[in-house]
Amino acid sequence: MEPNLPSGDGQKGPPKNSPNIVHFFIVGIVITFILNMVVSTMMTDRKVQIEYGQFIQLVEDGAVKQVRIETDQIALTLKDGANQSRVAQILHGSPENSQVLKSLVYYTGRLDDPGLTQRLIDNEVAFYKPIVQSNPILSFISSWIFPLLIFYGVYYVITRNFSKSLGGIGGMMNVGKSKAKYYDMEKNTGVSFNDVAGQDEAKESLTELVDFLHSPEKYRQIGAKQPKGALLVGPPGTGKTLLAKAVAGEAKVPFFSLSGSEFVEMFVGVGASRVRDLFGEAAKHAPCIIFIDEIDAIGKSRDTHLGGNDEREQTLNQLLAEMDGFDSSKGVLILAATNRPEILDKALLRPGRFDRRIIVENPDLPGREAILAVHAKKVTLGPDVKLREIGLATSGATGADLANMVNEAALRAVRLGRTEVLQEDLMDAVEVVIAGKEKKDRILNPREKRMVAFHETGHALAAAVQADRETDAPPVQKITIIPRTMGALGYTMNRPEEERYLMTRSELLARITTLLAGRAAEEIEFGEISTGAANDIERATKLARSMVTQYGMSGKFGMMALESVQNQYLDGRSVSLVSEATGADVDKEVACILDECHQKALALLRQNRDRLAEIALFLIERETMSGFQFMELLRGRKTA
Ligand code: ADP
Ligand code: MG
Ligand code: ZN
């Protein structure tokens, strides 16, 4: 759970004003009272009270050895050689009753008896009056204060363990005061820039920060102020957290990390006090790095229309105040990561706070190759492995995806009883990550199988026919009709392409046509359509809509921006900027593009109907075909 930190962060004890401690003390007082009663009755049990007359008689009889005269009572000790039956006669009225036990102490109330002293002297009884009488203050302390202190100790131990074991919830009793660890501290992260591949620009900007931490004097001499914070921005899984750790590792400084959501609790004020604590703790360990992951959880813009969130705003204000307050020359650097920079409060981004923005993008082809190489170092590779091919096949994959693929490949190799990872393991892992595992127990009936085969062949054929004729490479890498766990009944893996940064209008149209060709093939072959095209339709529509609303590629609206992208690093959702009436026109325009492409797909497949059937039949028989097999079938027909 929460990591334990040495020194300075122990609990300062429960708060004084919580109602629980009052309850606890009331219970404590009651128990102490009962204890005192029990103790005093036990003490009186061992004492036997006798009448004053009996006391005088015992003295006169010479049975008393010693007398202790206290303030309001007289205690007496009997002589060892006293006549037992005589004593019994005096005390109990009969000589037989000899329950005279030496261990008992007899006492009687002290009367105003001026002759007592003389009487004791006459009967040779030793007597004295104790000088130190039971001090009322001392006895109060021993019977009341002391037990209460013990109760307090018990209370302290219990509450501390309670809040430790329950973390934030146990903190109900001492909300906000609890310093149970909500952050992680690593003395040495053990991560270096070498472990982060392919993010060269990001590493370059961070190298300077490392230098700041290393030798602050160099910058102070010239009068340069050290930057306080940097914001790492990029899609999930691209290595932001890894980079932050690498900065700490390179600079060899402690790394305090926590997630933005850990600041924000149910209780107002907790987040703010945690921010304070964290900065206080970090200042003690300077130079060091504070890393706030997913900072959007607290850094959300304060003027959202959804109504304020007091706790979050307080936390954010505290963070802003701390960032202004601390002296960066001490060498505390704040890094934060987010994949939603657009929602961050402007105040966080102004100079002097997170003024540096470091973009951590999805890796490009060389980047992917490098990341694969970093992770492949940890596994034993076979001689046939070509990481470049894997890099080509994984356009759009993040660093986390690639790390996962290498691991999946290693697992597959073990499953197949091999001691090294082969290229086929890696290719299979790519498919698993992209499309899910093969689901062998999902049996398609023959008609479904035919339909899926024609559908997939339709995609592949449309891609092949539209591909530019100069390259010889197959337009698809693999076609399969084995169902996958992620819902696909079959799929066509596109040709690995060199990185594309720009797409032309005709390329986009060709892509939409390819997407719609699956459905078109069903229509042509079966005169019937299936639900299998849902995903194709969704993607085609998205593309067509972007063409109209973002890329200015429709004849009707020209270069008018109709939508703006909201969170470019997550799902790329966009919001409409236009009136409802215009929105309806946009929809018409999108439908128009889709219809055009659908007609084109139908036309292409009709022209190549014999090839469509032949390749589909091959697929039904073999279930999987490679890009080369596909090309051979395609060409064989062409040349014949
Ligand atoms: P983020 O914080 O951006 O969501 P992480 O830093 O947590 O992503 O990355 C998750 C994992 O993915 C890392 O632990 C690492 O194994 C792998 N990874 C991501 N990017 C890279 C990279 N550039 N180089 C090497 N490994 C990477
Ligand atoms: Mg992260
Ligand atoms: Zn499809």
Image: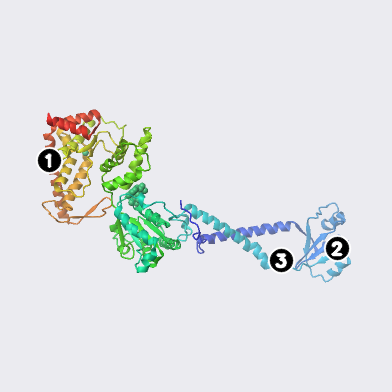
Q: CA distance from mark 3 to mark 2?
A: 26 Å
In percent of the image, x 19 and y 41: which residue is there?
515
Q: How many marks?
A: 3
Q: CA distance from mark 3 to mark 1?
A: 110 Å
Which amino acid type is shown beneath numbered disc 1?
Lys
Disc 2 residue lies near ligand 2 with CB under 8 A: no
Instruction: Choose mark 1 or mark 2, whichever is in front.
Output: 1
| Sooner in the amino-acid sequence: mark 3 or mark 1 | 3
Which amino acid type is shown beneath numbered disc 3?
Ser
Q: Quadrant of residue 311?
A: bottom left
Instruction: Choose mark 3 or mark 1, whichever is in front.
Output: 1
Give how far across and how far down residue 375 sits, in percent.
35, 44
On the question of residue 260 being in view, the answer is: no
* Viewer-proximal residue among 526 and 182: 182
Q: CA distance from mark 1 to mark 2?
A: 132 Å
Left or right: residue 363 versus residue 144 is left
Q: Quadrant of residue 406?
A: top left
Mark 3 burial class by Cα count in 10 Å: few <14, some 14-19, many 20+: few
On the question of residue 256 being in view, the answer is: yes
Left or right: residue 532 versus residue 250 is left
Disc 3 residue lies near ligand 2 with CB under 8 A: no
The residue identified by callout 2 is 59
* Viewer-proximal residue among 143 and 202: 202
Mark 2 burial class by Cα count in 10 Å: few <14, some 14-19, many 20+: many
Local SS, label 3: loop
The residue identified by callout 1 is 600
In percent of the image, x 14 and y 43: which residue is there?
597
Q: Quadrant of residue 412?
A: top left
Label annotation for residue 134: 3
Check if mark 1's residue and mark 2's residue have beta carbons within 8 Å: no
